[in-house]
Image (cartoon, rainbow, N blue to C red):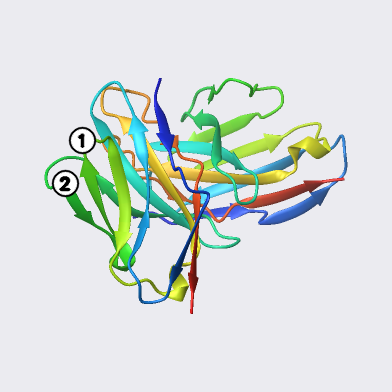
Amino acid sequence: SAVISQKPSRDICQRGTSLTIQCQVDSQVTMMFWYRQQPGQSLTLIATANQGSEATYESGFVIDKFPISRPNLTFSTLTVSNMSPEDSSIYLCSGGQGVDTGELFFGEGSRLTVL
Amino acid sequence: AQSVAQPEDQVNVAEGNPLTVKCTYSVSGNPYLFWYVQYPNRGLQFLLKYITGDNLVKGSYGFEAEFNKSQTSFHLKKPSALVSDSALYFCAVRDMGNSNYQLIWGAGTKLIIKP
């Protein structure tokens, strides 16, 4: 198993600012993903974080708004740029070691509120 | 198209009674199936998975799930519910033939166990 730490755990941000969320894994993971979740709702995949290359974004998410870095197999960042109240959500980092099974480990999430 | 359905938004069970949380899926190939649990204000935790083999799989906290290929279902069960089982439960599926390792998530079912 892997333990994933995210920070910040929560933040209150002003409209128009940007915030970077950090995700640290205690062991190397093959796959890393960033999700968005409204409280009590399902997960929406933002992107797959690829080590050493550009992330792969899902429909509706773009690099200019959600730039992602993944410099190595244990660390990734997600930036939420030029925030608006619609970006208020929980952002979850996840990682997987079993490329053939899809079992994922999740961070505790970063709850962002944009005023 | 691939999809996961959790037909119940909420399931209420008395403590000590058996519980079932339903999940059906649709994939073009053979499925990998997962259950995750999310406790309030926490990230998701892996409960169990079906990859191949025995249709009845056992997981954490006394949960089990049965893969039924003909009904394309993977219902989560527990013989005797505990109040501490109250949480949000997500079913997820991955098509074995899909090389991008992404999971398709259900909408989630809120499980409430009453003392």
**Vertical comparison of A109 with A79: above or below:** below
The answer to whether marks 2 and 1 mark residues whose Cβ atoms lie closer than 8 Å is: yes
Q: Is mark 1 on a helix, strand or loop?
A: loop
How packed mark 2 is, by other alpha carbons closer than 10 Å (few <14, some 14-19, many 20 or more), is some
Quarter of the image with the N terminus of chain B in it: top left
Q: Nearer the viewer, residue B11 or B64?
A: B11
Disc nearer the start of the sequence (2/1): 2
Residue denoted by label 2: B55
Which residue is at 50% across, 47% downward? B108
User: Do badges 2 and 1 share one subunit?
Assistant: yes
Q: Which of marks 2 and 1 is in front?
A: 1
Residue placed furthest toward the bottom = B115
| Tag 1: amino acid | Lys
Residue B70 x/y as whole percent: 20, 33
Q: How many marks overall? A: 2
Chain at tag 2:
B
Front-lying residue, A24 or B18: B18
Where does residue A97 sit, x and y in percent of width and height? Answer: 33, 43
Please name whichever residue, A47 or A60, is drawn nearer the observer in this view of the structure. Answer: A60
Which of the two residues, B16 or B1, is positioned nearer the viewer here?
B16
Q: Distance between the residues labelled 2 and 1?
A: 9 Å
For residue B110, side relative to residue B75 (left or right): right
Q: Residue at x 63, y 24 (%)?
A: A61
Query: Which quadrant holds residue A65?
Result: top right
Which structural element holds mark 2?
A: loop
On the question of residue A74 being in view, the answer is no
* Residue placed under numbered mark 1 in the picture: B69
